[in-house]
Image (cartoon, coloured by chain):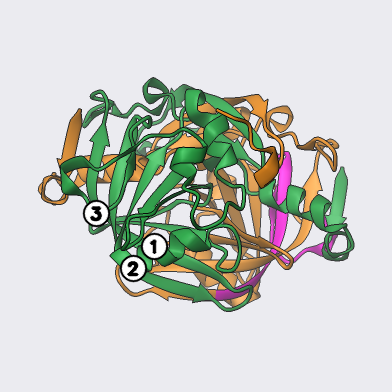
Chain colours: A orange, B green
Amino acid sequence: MIKYSRSDIEGMDRITRLTLINSITGYKPANLIGTINSIGNTNLAIISSVVHLGSDPALIAFIMRPLIGERHTMENILETGYYTINHIHRDIAEKAHFTSADFPREVSEFDRCKLTPVFLDDFKAPFVADSKIKLGMSFAETIEIKRNGTIMVIGQVEKICMDEPYFTPSAGLDLAQAGTICISGLDSYHEVEKWATFPYARVNEVPEF
Amino acid sequence: MIKYSRSDIEGMDRITRLTLINSITGYKPANLIGTINSIGNTNLAIISSVVHLGSDPALIAFIMRPLIGERHTMENILETGYYTINHIHRDIAEKAHFTSADFPREVSEFDRCKLTPVFLDDFKAPFVADSKIKLGMSFAETIEIKRNGTIMVIGQVEKICMDEPYFTPSAGLDLAQAGTICISGLDSYHEVEKWATFPYARVNEVPEF
C-alpha cells in the first residue's frame, strides 16, 4: 500500500500537490458557467465543482477562488444576479478547457474559444448554444469559506433546457445520451458509460450480501 | 428543445423533481464516508457530494442533510473529529449503494453490507478495506446553508492510502486504473474511460479554434 501523510502532502511541490488533491475526490462534473456584465461583455468559465444542494427548492452550488481566473464570473453574477450552467460534451471539451486561460476582461471566452452565446427566452445570462443540457440560474447567496478564502456560490434553478428529451420520470436523466463527460484532476476528460441502476434502498429490502 | 421553467419544476411530484434535480449537475463522485462513535459503533454512508475546496491546505467538503439518513455520520464526526472518504469501484458498488438504507443506530452498514472496516496506523476512523483509494480526514468545520437546512462539512486531508501506485506527479492520479466509478442521479452507476488530457491553459498558447 502506498501512503501519503499530511506532512508528505504539505512537503510536495505546488504542482504535484495541486495535481494530487484536485483528483483525490474522484470524478467531477464538467460544466461551463456563462455570464454577462451590465455593459454586455460576456464571460465563460469551466468549473468542475458544481454540487447539488437540494431539490425543493432546487439549489445548486459551486466553489470559486475569488482572486484568480474566475473573478470575472463572480463579478458578473453579482452585477446581474443571473448565470447559466452548461454541460460539456466531447465535441466541445477542448474549447471548454481553454476557457480556463486567464484572458483579460475585454476578451470573451465565447469569442476566443468559439463557443456560441445564446439568450433563450430573454434569460438575463448567456447560455452555451453548443451545450446539450443548459441550466438558467438566479443567484441566491455566497458563503465564504474563511479557512482558505474560497467562496461557495449558491443559486436557484430557474430554467432547464435540453436539446432532446433526455429526461423521463421513470428512467431519470440520461447523461450518456446527452454525451455529458466528466473531469479528473485539472486536465483529464472522460467518457462515461452506465452499467448499473440499483433500487431505492429500503431497510427491509437490502440484499443479503 | 425541451424546457422546464421554475414553476414546471416546483409543480413536479416529489420523486420526479428529486430524480431530475439530483442528476442535473452532471456526474458525481462515488465515495463512502466511514465513521465510528466514542463507544465503538461504526457507520458507513455513500455520499455523492464530495467536492475539492483547495490544495494548500488540502481541504475537501461534502454536503449533508442533517435530519435524515446520514445523521449518524454527522454525529460520529462531531464526536471523534475524524472520518474517512473511500472511493467506490465496480465490485463494491452494489454494497455501497445499500448503505443508504435508513438502518437503526445499532446496525453498522459495514456489517450489514459486508464491507470490511480497517483502522490503518491507528487512524481514529475506520477505512473501507475493500476500497482502493482511501482518505483519512480530520474534521475542520461545518457551515450551515440556512436556505435549505443542509450542512457543508469541511475536512483536512490527513492521510491518503492507495492499493497501487495510481499517482505519479507527471501523469496525475489514474482513477481508471483504480476502477473508481461515478454516479448520476440517485441510483445510476457508471464506468469511466479517459479519452483526452489538455495542456495547462496559458493565454498565449490557446489554440485557434
Query: In this figure, what is the number of numbered marks?
Result: 3
In screen coordinates, is B122 left or right of B75?
left
Measured as percent of width and height from the top left, residue B52 is found at: 39, 52
**In the depicted structure, whether residue B79 falls above or below residue A91:** below
Q: Residues within 10 Å of mark 3 (few under 14, many from 20)?
A: some
Measured as percent of width and height from the top left, residue A144 is found at: 42, 74
Task: State which chain disc 3 sits on.
Answer: B
Residue named by callout 1 = B76
Task: State which chain disc 2 sits on.
Answer: B
Name the kind of residue labelled 2 in the image. Glu
Q: Which mark is residue B79?
A: 2
Q: Residues within 10 Å of mark 2 (few under 14, many from 20)?
A: few
Where does the N terminus of chain B fall, quadrant-wise?
top right
Q: Give the secondary structure at mark 1.
A: helix
- 1 or 3: tag closer to the N-terminus: 1
Measured as percent of width and height from the top left, residue A78 is found at: 57, 75
Residue at 79% across / 49% down in the picture? A161
Residues drawn in magenta? A120-141
Name the kind of residue labelled 3 in the image. Lys
| Distance CA(mark 2)–CA(mark 3) | 11 Å
Task: State which chain disc 1 sits on.
Answer: B
Instruction: Indicate yes or no whether the magenta region holds residue A30.
Output: no
Can see residue A110? yes
Residue at 59% across / 68% down in the picture? B67
Q: Give the secondary structure at mark 3.
A: loop
The image quadrant of residue B4 is bottom right
**In the depicted structure, whether residue B4 falls above or below residue B164:** below
Instruction: Indicate yes or no whether the magenta region holds residue A127.
Output: yes
